[in-house]
Amino acid sequence: MFVSQSECAYLKALLAMFPSAEAKNNYHALATLASIIKSIFLFNEPSIIQLVVSDEQIFENCCCCLEYDPDLKEKANHRWFIRDRLKFRTVLIMEVS
């Protein structure tokens, strides 16, 4: 419940720490952030998921954090995939009548 309060201020504060940790190449802090972000997603709280998927910057920052997941054998390239390879397409247009 705490994480989803105040428009997910806790999650936003965690994501705000990411750029400085990455600039300093602090892999311990990056791995810790990735583990925390991953745990927050595993709560499966609808308000948190809605915030992440509705805000482009928060979505990208979460993906950036997850690149440093300590459970991965090597660093992922989520940013590269999102920026260079991903192509969103409209599968079905739904009109509200």
Image (cartoon, rainbow, N blue to C red):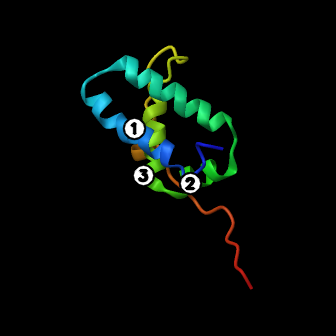
Front residue of this view, candidates 69 and 29: 29
Which residue bears the numbered disc 2?
51
Eye-nearest disc, 1 or 2: 2
Residue 95 x, y percent position in the rendering:
70, 78
The amino acid beneath tag 3 is Gln
Position of 65 with respect to 89 (left or right) is: left
Mark 3 and mark 1: Cα distance apart in space: 15 Å
Query: Where 13 falls versus 90 (above or below)?
Result: above
* Crowd tier of the residue under label 1, counting other residues whose Cα lies within 10 Å: few below 14, some 14–19, many 20 or above: few
Q: Looking at the image, which is closer to me, 47 or 74?
A: 47
In the rendered structure, which amino acid carries the disc numbered 2?
Answer: Leu
State if disc 2 and disc 3 touch (CB < 8 Å): no
- Alpha-carbon distance for marks 1 and 2? 22 Å
User: Residue 7, position in %: x, y?
Assistant: 54, 55
SS assignment at label 2: helix
* Residue at 46% over, 49% down: 58
Secondary structure beneath label 1: helix
Can see residue 21? yes
Question: Which is more foreground, mark 3 or mark 1?
Answer: 3
Q: How far is mark 3 from mark 2, CA to CA?
A: 10 Å
Q: Residue furthest top?
A: 73
Residue occupied by mark 3: 57
Instruction: Report which residue position mark 1 lands on.
Output: 80
Query: Label 1 is placed on what type of residue?
Result: Trp
Quarter of the figure that contains the N terminus:
top right
Discs 3/2, front: 2
Q: In this view, does 74 lie to the left or right of 26?
A: right
Residue 13 occupies quadrant:
top left
Residue 50 appears at what percent x and percent y? Answer: 62, 54
Quadrant of the frame with the C terminus: bottom right
56 sits left or right of 41 in the view: left
